[in-house]
Image: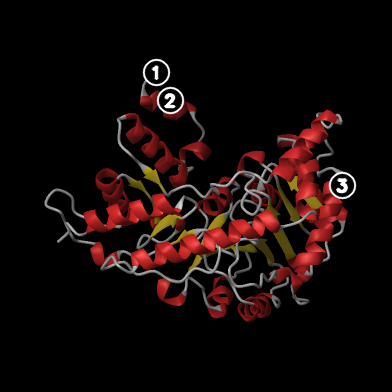
């Protein structure tokens, strides 16, 4: 079967769907390792810590207790209750258990929302730089992504005026993350209030706040936009266990939403995957209601790694980075390298920059073009201190060859 025949068989939906750049870089790293190269991959957004023992023990006990069967689509009652209590305790959010939907990861929560809310041509305002999947999931759901962009000099924070100007009668919702993937940016209380104030008059527009990195916040204050009275009834808050509890492989996320939206997402999920794993949900309830000491220890380790990365990036002429206050990424601007060459390769954009680093330093990064900013690259410091120091040493060396 020829490539042309295969493309004729596949749907236009999948043909127009971009491959995840983070997974693409991970595949390139595996291929280079197979050739014998010592590759340091700083491309994936995955904590390098093990899930805390008490959470693993809770899952094991749940399996022994018989929690190996189907679950209610929206989640086990003990977990939806725990999420409701967590929202109130940590975020000043009033979502009742029946407003909670537990999914197979926070990504599924976003997908459910797009499927439940978007008709063809509906618009979604997306803060840029953005997590890669926002854009593709909106497109996959028939929606039109509308980016509002801010660069490194503004800490990647769009102005409230930009947000207001992007809203039209076709806008269904606005989506952003704080702490942000890919930039590490954290929005302050005052900044979120300003966004709420400009969005509030548009009664047809909802807000989707992705707070999956909530517990990896170095500012000592995480603020949820849904806690502001003028937008609380139109805010959907997405969160999960992957980042703060090192539970990426558990595939467990959740959201709180107005009841009619939660019901719609449950309806969608019921026809796609049904409920998340029973024993995983039991462990998730324990995670939310138990001591956060292991999570806080991970956060402090990430803070130390951030400081190492920033100090070493400062030693590389031409790289311009902000000071990220959360998550485990830096997102430096590398436009000063555009047009430079080592005699064999010319850097024209961030894609070329990342390919050059991978091919010459064997360090895996992700081009900012995947996140809506072709001037930058994303480096994940969810790696050991030794790996980070070696990766940045290699980067400095090969970048020094460019003229």
Task: Decide: few, some or many residues near mark 3? Use Cα within 10 Å; few <14, some 14-19, many ≥20.
Answer: some
- Residue 250: image x %, image y %? 67, 40
Question: In this orientation, does residue 123 appear?
Answer: no
Disc 2 to disc 3, how far (Cα)?
47 Å
Q: Nearer the viewer, residue 14 or 37?
A: 37
Q: Which is more toward the observer, 386 or 245?
A: 386
Give residue 1's mark.
Answer: 1
Q: Residue furthest top?
A: 1
Residue occupied by mark 2: 6
- Secondary element type, mark 1: loop
Query: Image height check: is 267 above or below 198?
Result: above
Work out whether mark 2 precedes mark 3 in sequence or the reverse, and give the earlier one: 2
Left or right: 389 with respect to 200? Answer: left
Q: Are marks 3 and 1 in contact (CB under 8 Å)?
A: no
Observer-nearest of 159 and 51: 51
Label 2 with label 1: CB-CB less than 8 Å:
yes
User: How much space separates mark 2 and mark 1, taking CA atoms?
Assistant: 7 Å
| Res 55 quadrant in image | top right
Q: Identify residue for label 3.
A: 78
């Amino acid at each position: 079967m020829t490539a042309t025949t295969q493309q004729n068989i596949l749907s236009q939906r999948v043909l127009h769907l971009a491959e995840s750049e983070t997974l693409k870089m991970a595949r390139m790293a595996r291929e280079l390792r197979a050739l014998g190269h010592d590759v340091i991959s700083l491309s994936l957004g995955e904590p390098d810590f093990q899930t805390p023992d008490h959470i693993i023990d809770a899952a094991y006990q749940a399996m022994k207790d018989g929690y190996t069967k189907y679950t209610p689509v929206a989640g086990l009652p003990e977990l939806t209750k725990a999420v409701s209590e967590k929202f109130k305790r940590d975020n000043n959010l009033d979502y009742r258990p029946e407003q909670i939907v537990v999914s197979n990861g926070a990504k599924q929560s976003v997908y459910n929302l797009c499927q439940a809310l978007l008709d063809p041509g509906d618009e979604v305002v997306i803060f840029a730089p953005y997590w890669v999947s926002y854009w593709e999931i909106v497109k996959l759901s028939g929606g039109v992504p509308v980016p509002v962009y801010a660069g490194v000099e503004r800490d990647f924070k769009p102005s409230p005026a930009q947000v207001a100007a992007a809203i039209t009668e076709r806008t269904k919702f606005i989506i952003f993350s704080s702490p942000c993937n890919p930039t590490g940016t954290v929005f302050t209380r005052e900044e979120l209030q300003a966004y709420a104030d400009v969005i509030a008059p548009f009664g047809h527009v909802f807000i989707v706040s992705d707070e999956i990195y909530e517990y990896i916040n170095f500012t000592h204050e995480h603020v949820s936009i849904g806690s502001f009275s003028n937008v609380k009834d139109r805010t959907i808050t997405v969160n999960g266990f992957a980042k703060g509890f090192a539970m990426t492989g558990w595939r467990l996320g959740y959201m709180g939403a107005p009841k009619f939206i939660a019901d719609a997402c449950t309806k969608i999920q019921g026809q796609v995957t049904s409920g998340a794993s029973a024993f995983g949900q039991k462990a998730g309830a324990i995670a939310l209601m138990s001591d956060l000491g292991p999570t806080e220890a991970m956060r402090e380790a990430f803070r130390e790694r951030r400081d190492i990365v920033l100090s070493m990036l400062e030693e590389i002429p031409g790289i311009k980075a902000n000071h990220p206050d959360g998550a485990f990424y830096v997102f430096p601007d590398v436009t000063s390298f555009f047009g430079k060459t080592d005699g064999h390769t010319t850097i024209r954009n961030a894609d070329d920059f990342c390919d050059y680093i991978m091919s010459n330093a064997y360090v895996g990064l992700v081009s900012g073009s995947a996140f809506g900013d072709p001037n930058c690259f994303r480096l994940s410091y969810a790696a050991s201190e030794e790996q980070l120091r070696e990766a940045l040493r290699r980067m400095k060396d090969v970048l020094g060859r460019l003229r």
